[in-house]
Image (cartoon, grey):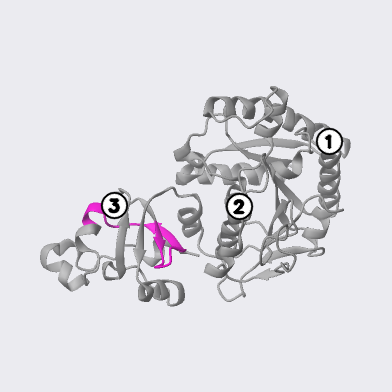
Amino acid sequence: MSGRLIVFKVGSSTLVDETGELDLGFVASMCSQIAELRRRGDRVVLVSSGAAAVGRSLLGFDARPSDIPTLQACAAAGQAKLIERYAEVLADDGLSCAQVLLTRGDVVDRTGYLNARNTFERLLELGVVPIVNENDTVSVREFSFGDNDMLGAIVASLIDADLYVILSDIDGLYTANPDSDPSASLIERVERVDARIAQMAGGTGSSYGTGGMATKVRAGRAMIAAGIPMAICRGRAPRALVDAADGRGRHTLFEGDGTGGHEQARKLWIGLAGLSRGSVTVDAGAARALELEGASLLPVGVTAVEGEFGEGDTVSVLAPDGHLVGRGITRYSSEDLWRVHGLRLDVIARFLPDRADCPVVHRDEMLVF
């Protein structure tokens, strides 16, 4: 099982101890396992949260600041300490690391996406361990990934990883919250994220993190679409990284049934990195056609339009129950789609002749989850 490319993501709640300080013992253990994986031929990328949490302690804040400038100041101070610690510990095992800070703006543009991919490939060729975080210091809401679970999923798809592992503070996805429901059981495998699976995900469990199980399930859905297995495991379990890489230990594995395969790189770029400018809700028939038949989205299947977007923008496609069917590039503005939604193409052609054969979103420009 050697020679694979593995992306690990570690969250703030796993990196810091109960006092809010960076847990140096855990960092040392994690880096030691990365070195072990490297010695056997695996290539490793680490997506690390924790900069804001470390900076918050460093700058003397007892609670998470509520204003953006202070949060970004914490991230700036904490990122320096965090990467310094990683560099020191990895050096003890003869490894070098590189800091890679990204915003959505860096990868939503196709040129930026390819540049980032080339940088990762070259670092890995040189034997360097890339350590990735969102560039919180300059990121604004429009260009924020929102959470590092999805950032890790984007990085995994960007470099065509063989496995994506989220090191969490819980063993994986449970049928219910195990802290409050003693009957809750661990789900060992998820082949498709439907409404039932999505409803099992809880909220944020730590004052240090920004994501909860819901963000991990969204990342799992993205990885199933990308054809990349994703595991959620308890990061502080002994030898968690090595065991997850080898498929051992308690975890939840998100992996399709093998019939779908990898989506095209362009679809992944649209669905994962593209910033959604609005949403369209479709009826049950359209949702089935998109999910099961590989169809394009036609105006007749649209029941509602939310947000303001233009032709060529990325939009989210929602099922009647609100779950995300996919994301794609719309060929209508929100204004035009309001005028024609629910209508057949032959009817639309009577007053918009140039749209006689125009779907809302063509299947070749849509990632269906």
Secondary element at image label 3:
loop
> Within 10 Å of the Cα at label 2, are there few (<14), some (14-19), or many (20+) other Cα atoms?
few
At x 46%, y 46%, the residue is 110
Residue 297, image quadrant? bottom left
Residue placed most toward the observer, 314 or 5: 314
Is 323 inside the magenta-drawn segment?
Answer: yes
Residue 41 at least partly seen: no
Tell me: residue 365, above or below residue 211: below
* Residue interval drawn in magenta: 316-336
Secondary element at image label 2:
loop
Coordinates of residue 310 in the picture (x, y in percent):
29, 49
Q: Which residue is mark 2?
A: 203
Coordinates of residue 173 in the picture (x, y in percent):
68, 62
Q: Which residue is mark 1?
A: 24
Residue placed most toward the observer, 357 or 290: 290
The disc, 3 or 1, on the residue closer to the chain's N-terminal end is 1
Q: Which residue is mark 3?
A: 311
At label 2, the amino acid type is Gly
